[in-house]
Image (cartoon, grey):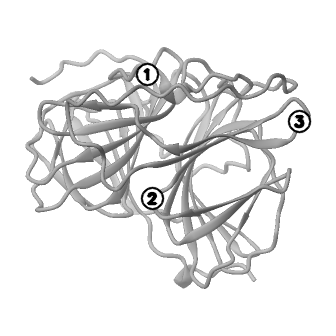
Amino acid sequence: MPMTDHEIPPIRRVITGHNKDKRAVVTIDDFASNHQRRAGVNDTLIWSSDEMPVEIWSDEDYGSREVGVQPPTRGTCIRYIDIMPGNPREQQRTETLDYVMCLSGKIDLELDNGVTKHLQAGDFIVQQATNHSWLNRGTESCRLAVVMLDSKKRPVVGNPSPPRMRPHDGNGLTPDPPLQRLVTKNNSDGKSVVAWEGIASNHKWSGRGMVATLIWSTDECPAEVWVDEDYGARALGTQPPRNGSRFTINDYPAQMPGRMHRTDTLDIIVVMDGEIDMELDDGVETHLNKGDIMIQQGTNHAWWNRSERNCRLAIILIDAKEGELEITA
């Protein structure tokens, strides 16, 4: 039976944009309610886009649209998927690059070659248009945050090459707990396989103690999902390439001060653990807790961790249209 509203844990959604004076403002702060239900699964749309670079200068609520299983051509969508215990096996595949975050519970990812990977809260998956099933064999529901990017459609070629992770350079602390990364792809026979699995180690440290770990990246739209390169081993810059995306996990230490910054990107941000304050350039602050999700539309902002414990954010940056904006220092 499909889940009812009272069985779905609330999903807080915070959206930022710009006012008529081109200052950063919170435009939406509510609980997501755009649900699609099927047996054992609830799918909640958070945000979507239908072009690349992404449109971030519109007043439309892109989370209220009717979006099907696959995002629009050259588009993206961000969903929260709640999977109940004992959900029926449903083999599925979309022509997309999927950034998947396990927020709570446990789940089995089953590929069409019979390989099964057990995942739990805090694990991260990159799926490159692979045929798969999600199976909840536990006793509690599992919540996944899934960002889907339109990808190229073409036959499968080649075999995965070994991972080429950048070494630890000793400039900061290794993220704790470690980041388990799983990447799938299609082999030369058209079967889904695990291409890379292990602890993500492509880190970049800031002077304030924050560490960013690259999980995956792209440099074109539709996204390329038919290559052997480990896109998580690339150099980690501040902004993704033109028409590209970047998936990082950012760890903010306790009592870390904020620094105002901005990129021409649509940012999808999920609080994986801890709590944090997001300050806009008008001085308004929004407090975020574990499980909250924020969509930032090219807004000037700062992250303040005023708590006594670390905070972990999963952040997907998608290249967006540039706007005429005066940046506050």
Residue ID at (17%, 49%): 253
Which callout, 2 or 1, points at the residue further toward the start of the chain? 2
Residue 129 falls left or right of residue 267 = right
> Which quarter of the rendered picture does the C terminus lie within?
top left
Disc 3 crowd rating (10 Å Cα; few below 14, some 14-19, many 20+) is some
Label 2 vs label 3: CA separation?
A: 29 Å
Alpha-carbon distance for marks 3 and 1?
A: 30 Å
Q: Residues within 10 Å of mark 1 (few under 14, many from 20)?
A: many
Compared to residue 285, the image places residue 300 above or below, namely above
Give whichever of 234, 201 is nearer the camera.
201
Look at label 3 and name its amino acid: Gly
User: Where is residue 303 shown, x and y percent of the image?
Assistant: 19, 43
* Image coords of residue 235 (percent x, y): 41, 19
Callout 2 secondary element: loop
Q: Nearer the viewer, mark 2 or mark 1?
A: 2
In the picture of the structure, the residue carrying the numbered disc 1 is 240
Q: Say which amino acid is labelled 1.
A: Pro
Inspect this view and state whether residue 287 appears. no
Q: Are marks 3 and 1 in contact (CB under 8 Å)?
A: no
Q: Are marks 2 and 1 in contact (CB under 8 Å)?
A: no
Is residue 88 shown left or right of residue 271?
right
- Circle 3 is placed at which residue position? 190
